[in-house]
Image: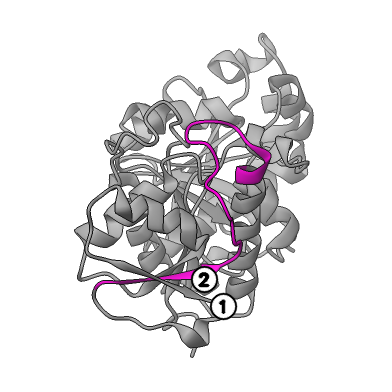
Amino acid sequence: MTAHDAPLAVTMGDPSGIGPEIIAKMYLRRPDKRHWIVVGDALVMNHALSGLDADVRVRPIASLDETLFEDGTLNVLCSSQLRTLPPVSQVSAIGGRAAFDAILAAIRLARDGRVGGIVTAPIHKEALAAAGLHYPGHTEILADHGGAPKVAMMLANEDIRTVLVTVHCSLSEAIRKGDFAAQMDAIRLANAGAQALGIAHPRVAVAGLNPHAGEGGLFGDEEIHIIRPAIEAARAEGIDASGPWPGDTVFMQARKGRFDIVVAQYHDQGLIPVKYMGLDHGVNVTLGLPFVRTSPDHGTAFDIAGTGVADPSSLETAFDYALRLKASLPNLKADTP
């Protein structure tokens, strides 16, 4: 079985958040798309389904060889075996460790080609820290364990796509980290990510760091000495990159169809425009990995966990992106000279 034919793996996320609930709801709402497994904890998923009054049984499995795809059966590959449920809507070391163990188990499956990709439900950074795991998010875990020298975060919806030069760090650190090499990695991965989505010759817009893209050096010179040289080097490699464009207008231009994807310099510069369009259809894609990984564009939502009102739409969109991307696996990795 190849990764193209293999089922997707959906990690349960933090068991105290909405991840298990939206996974259960996705299973119930889409009976025509049930060729996937949960990687997580059987007790947690049983509890999530019981709150929905669903006629579904959890099938705990120790390996994919035990998987049984039939209606009414949710296969859960057990990465943990909790004896009691972690407290709902609360940060806990138990929840952080269980979420982390599920991610690592799914990564191992993906790297071995046993699953066609990973869709990750939300995790909580404080819960990871409480468990002694000092990762600010999925991207950094995947960078350490995913088997790729360079990764980047792409946020996408039907109107905008963006790749980040820097991810989870302070703004001052983002400025330091956004050097020539980081610019090149992001531009190459943006080009590869857009191609994986079916855009043969992507138009890659690179946002500036400073107001008005530095205004010719009046408001900062990173555009002159770092960003523009990277754009020129990318163009020499055959990438249709342009810029640096002012960060306050480049996403509007992309939405109007002038660009296919935008390289943003730091976390909020790229995420605010995407999230402003709505969380229901936004997807986070990790580029550069040897396998597909997507996630919904929202967090654990502790404020509504356990109430039964969580909307699975963004998870469903992430799942559909994973199906779409796994058919383009070779294009997900940037060619880095």
Q: Secondary structure at mark 1?
A: loop
Is residue 6 on the magenta stretch?
Answer: no
**Observer-nearest residue: 268 or 313?**
313
Q: Amino acid at mark 1?
A: Ala
Q: Nearer the viewer, residue 311 or 155?
A: 311
Answer whether residue 244 is visible to the viewer in this image: yes
* Most distant residue in the front direction: 83
Q: Is residue 115 left or right of residue 209?
A: left
Q: Read off the residue under disc 2.
A: 77
Residue 232: x %, y % from top left: 65, 44
- For marks 1 and 2, the one nearer the N-term is 1
Work out which residue is located at the far bottom of the displayed protein and give it. 1
Magenta stretch contains residue 78: yes
Q: Amino acid at mark 2?
A: Leu
**Residue at (59%, 56%) from the top-left corner?**
82
Q: CA distance from mark 1 to mark 2?
A: 6 Å
Q: Name the residue that disc number 1 marks.
A: 62
| Disc 1 crowd, CA 10 A, few/some/many (<14, 14-19, 20+) | few
Residue at x 72%, y 35% (from the top left corner): 130
* Labelled pair 1, 2 in contact (Cβ < 8 Å): yes
Which residues, given as a range, are shown in magenta?
72-95
Q: Position of residue 328 (x, y in %)?
A: 45, 71
Q: In screen coordinates, is 229 left or right of 251? A: right
